[in-house]
Amino acid sequence: MILSDRDIKKAVTGGAISIVPYSENDVQPASVDIHLDREFMVFDVNRNFVIDTRQPVENLMKSITIKDDEAFVLHPGEFALGLILEETGVDAEHVGRLEGKSSLGRLGLIIHTTAGYLDPGNRLKMTLELYNAGRLPIKLYYKMPIGQMAFEKMSSPSERPYGSKGLNSKYYGDQGVQASKMHENKF
């Protein structure tokens, strides 16, 4: 069941959900607005010609950091990784779901192509998978509202929360933009 604004506030106060920095002004009827940080990663197409999912991606992407008043421009058809300003976490009884904001979706901005899930037990600054599906470039700014997190209580606490020993928790506790770690999967 998705938590209401009232239950989100209780869960934050009780420690089941953590959001840093947190403001009750960002709490919506069934979610919390999250904001864009200043870190991005883009594909370095001048030095790479293919993505090999079995190989590390250290040189596949390059980092970009914008200043407070500077825009990051996402061109039509481009993909970039971004970062949420808030460190967000859930206990072993909750999950978080990252969703886009309709105002940005109406401009053609997709904020996560697949990974919009905050696993039970994880606490991190989530990496955004930004895609401009429109026909005009979009300017993105530091601290602008970029999405919303909805939270759900699970039917029972997770036996092995994300980060538990034996799990392949590649992105546990991340604090910066993270490129793919697909090569760490066994296939």
Image: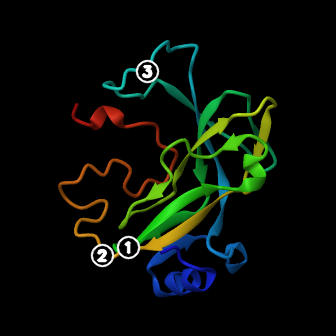
Judge from the rendering whether residue 55 lies leftward or rightward of residue 97; answer left or right: left
For label 3, the crowd category at 10 Å Cα-Cα, with few meaning under 14, some 14 to 19 and many 20 or more, is few
- 160 relative to 12, above or below: above
The residue under label 3 is: 51
The mark that comes first in sequence, 3 or 2, is 3
Judge by depth and name the residue closer to the eye, 16 or 60. 16
Q: Position of residue 185 (x, y in %)?
A: 27, 37
Could you say where residue 167 lies in the image, as x and y percent from the top left?
Answer: 23, 53
The local crowd at label 2, few if under 14, some if 14 to 19, many if 20 or more residues have their Cα within 10 Å, is some
Looking at this view, is 38 or 160 the one in front? 160
The secondary element bearing badge 2 is classed as loop
- Mark nearest the camera among 1 and 2 is 1
* Disc 3 to disc 1: CB gap under 8 Å: no
Quickly name the residue at label 2: 157
Q: Name the kind of residue labelled 1 in the image.
A: Met
* In the image, farthest residue toward the left: 166
Is 162 rendered above or below residue 129?
below
Spatial CA span between label 1 and label 2? 7 Å
Side (left or right) of 76 relative to 178: right
Residue that badge 1 annotates: 154
Q: Residue 65 is drawn in which quadrant?
A: top right
| Foreground tag (3 vs 2) | 2
At a point 62% along the width and 46% down the height, the residue shown is 111
Q: Quadrant for residue 101, please give it.
A: bottom right
Label 1 neighbour load within 10 Å: few <14, some 14-19, many 20+? some
Residue drawn 51% across and 70% down? 151
Are the two marked residues, 1 and 2, in contact with CB atoms closer than 8 angstroms?
yes
Amino acid type for the residue under numbered disc 2? Pro
Given this view, does label 3 or label 1 mark the residue nearer the observer?
1
Is residue 143 shown left or right of residue 121?
right
